[in-house]
Structure formats: structure tokens, C-alpha cells
Amino acid sequence: MIAIKTQDCSMHLVSVLNARYQFASFCQFMACTTVVIFSSGSLAIEKADIIFTSNKTITMVGEKIARPLSIAVNGERIVWIGSPEEGKNILGRHIKLGDKAILPGFIDAHGHASYLAFTSQFVNVASPPVGAVEGIKDLKAVLKKSLADKKLQPGEWLIGFGYDDSLLKEQRHPTREDLDEISREIPVYLIHVSGHLGVANSKALSITKISAASPNPPGGKIRRYLSSSEPNGVVEETAAYPLQKMAMASVKNPIDGYEKAIQVYARHGITTAQDGAVSGPSLALLKMAAKKGHLKIDIIAYIIGQGTPISKIRSLNFGQYENRVKLGGIKLILDGSPQGKTAYLSEPYLKPPSGEAQSYRGYPIISQTAVNDNILAFSEAK
């Protein structure tokens, strides 16, 4: 498969299309045909950087019969489309695709490239088809094996990512007791698939000073045992921040994670990825990875508004690519996750989390006044 990245997704283009291409794996599900998302008249050219020729092309103008097609590319632009007979006369590098597929490059509308760079280095505790955890018993087995394999040193953490309480047989979150069975000496923390919640063992709670005396922080909750103030290990939103920070700090070679993360995007035909909610430190890591040449696709990053000083906002260069990275804007996180049942809804959840009333509909993690103040400050800063 060849993925073509277009900067204009309209199917009514009449001349030149902005494009960027990359090679990816053979696309079996497209039935070995070529897919083109545009229609354009031929342009008279003599030379191009690359000329792709396919035996079969399916356009989106209603044609039922696949036909041969040639596409000429100069730099980042598709400059000509026509028949193979005409295309063979164009000077340049010719690539014959045969019956393989050529597809438009996908633009990731909501993603977290930096988060993937980190979480891909954690223990996979996801349910099928992403992982093998179908219940709490499976979860414990995966963690025990990982703990034995890693041979962690004192002070190191065991971090897992991707568990989903709604996919577990027990239909519940793991608890601190479940994770205490893995270890009472090694801090263990699992990040929910949504990224908005997590669960910690007693050692991890102790290190981050989360106890029965800890109040719920603004915009977050420490889940507790019924009829008790003792934490059950599950933390939501801002209450999870101290544990998330420790989890990310446990990654020894974060730069290496970017190369692996970008490969995931690329092999699925994504040519522009989003990095939503980067912090100052993660933005610095992203730029370092880009400078080292680890980014084979473009990334548009959005810096977190909460906690980012206005002076920092003023110093940033928005809207310009540098080594494939562009700052697209500022992101304010208003509430949580529908998966984790922390998103702030207009109506109550059908099945509220354990311990919550039937009227529970989530909660905001930032007040409307703070939202207004932030937006005004950011708009004046830029």
C-alpha cells in the first residue's frame, strides 16, 4: 500500500493537490485495487520526481470498472493524473504498483502520539483483541509474569496500561488488594484504557501520599471502600495526576518510544498524527525525537492550557512545522472520559460507577469561570 497525504480532503479538486506520500504494508482488505479520492484533468508535464502506475484504479466518481492509472508527484504535490500510456513518457522515477493498493493518507483527528510513545513501553493489560486480559485472574497472571521478567530494582515501578473494567468478566476495576497480590514492596500502577483513571497498590498509594485523610482534589476523585474513607486504589482525573507522573517518569528511554509509536501510525496509513494535550516537558521530548529523525510522519501538537504560564504560551511558535512537528493550538481539558464515566454529561449515566447516586452525570474538572479566563488570556497572549 502507498499512502498519499493530501492537505485538502475535498473530492472536487480541479487542479493540483497538496500531497505527501509514504510506503506502508500491502492492503489486502481493499481487494488488491487502487483507490483514489479525487478527480482531475490531465496536466502537460515532461518530468516528475515519481510516477506511480497501477493496473487497477477505483475513483469516487461512480465508475464501476477499475482502470489503469498513472499519478505523477513532485515533492509534496500530485502534479498530474492520466493514463499509463501518457505517464510512461514522463521523465522521473517510475514505480509500478501492479495490483497493489494506493490509498489516501489518513489524518488523525484525535490522538496522543507522545502518550503512545510512553504507554507502548508499559505492560499490556488490555482485553482482546488488543491484549489477553479477560478477567482479574488474567490480569494478575500477566502482571506476575511481567514482574518476574523485569527483575525490578528497589524504587522502580511496575506500570501497566490499557485495562478496561467494562470488558473484564467481573465488570469492575481492579482494587489495591488485587494489586497487593502482585507485590507489596514494588509500587504497581495500572492506567485505564481511557487514560483518565488508574488503580494503584498500597505501596504506590503510600509513595504518592494518598490515604484515608486525603481529600478529593478539585476536578478529581479518590474512590473509596463503601462506608469508609479508605482508598480502594482507583483514582480519577486530577487525583490520578501524581501517579501518572510517576508512571511516565519510570520510562528509561522515552525518545526510543517515539520511533515505535510513529511506526504504529505509519503502518495504518496515517500520515499526520495529533498529539493532544502535550505538556512543556513532553513537547521538549517530542521536538528532540523529531530532531533525531524518529518522526517519519507529521505531528500536530496541542499544548495543555491548564498550568501552562502565559509567558510560555507567548514564547511558542504556532502554525509552523519544524522537523515535522507543528503546534496547532492550546487544549483546555474540561472534563473526563465517557469510558471511565467521568465525562460531564447533560443526563445521568445509565449505570453509574459504584458508590455514586443514580443521578450521577460526571463532573467538570475546571470551572466555567476558569475556562473563560483561560481563553481570554490565551487569545490576548497570541
Image (cartoon, helix red, strand yellow):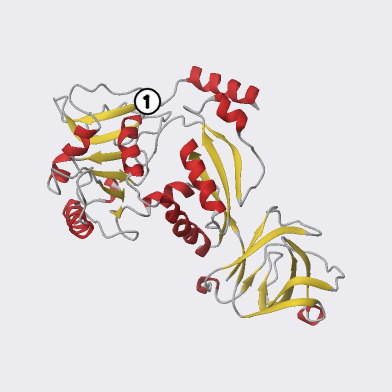
Find the residue positioned furthest to the top: 369
Frontmost residue, 195 versus 55:
195
Residue drawn at (43%, 52%) of the image: 117
Q: Is residue 60 visible?
A: yes
Q: Taking 25 as reference, is 152 left or right? A: left
Q: Quadrant of residue 95?
A: bottom right
Q: How many marks?
A: 1
Residue 324 coordinates in the image, percent (x, y): 61, 52
Frontmost residue, 241 versus 28:
241
Q: Which residue is mark 1?
A: 219
- The amino acid marked with disc number 1 is Gly
Q: Is residue 279 visible?
A: no
Residue 234 coordinates in the image, percent (x, y): 24, 36
* Circle 1 Cα neighbour tier, 10 Å, few/some/many (<14 / 14–19 / ≥20): some
Classify the position of the C terminus by image quarter.
top right
Q: Taking 336 as reference, is 247 left or right? A: left
Residue 282 coordinates in the image, percent (x, y): 47, 42
Residue drawn at (23%, 46%) of the image: 171
When the figure is inspected, residue 68 is found, relative to residue 188, above or below; the finding is below
Residue 74 coordinates in the image, percent (x, y): 76, 65
What SS does tag 1 mark? loop
Classify the position of the N terminus by image quarter.
bottom right
When the figure is inspected, residue 244 is found, relative to residue 259, above or below; the finding is above
Q: Quadrant of residue 18?
A: bottom right
Residue drawn at (85%, 67%) of the image: 43
When the figure is inspected, residue 25 is found, relative to residue 275, above or below; the finding is below
Residue drawn at (54%, 19%) of the image: 373
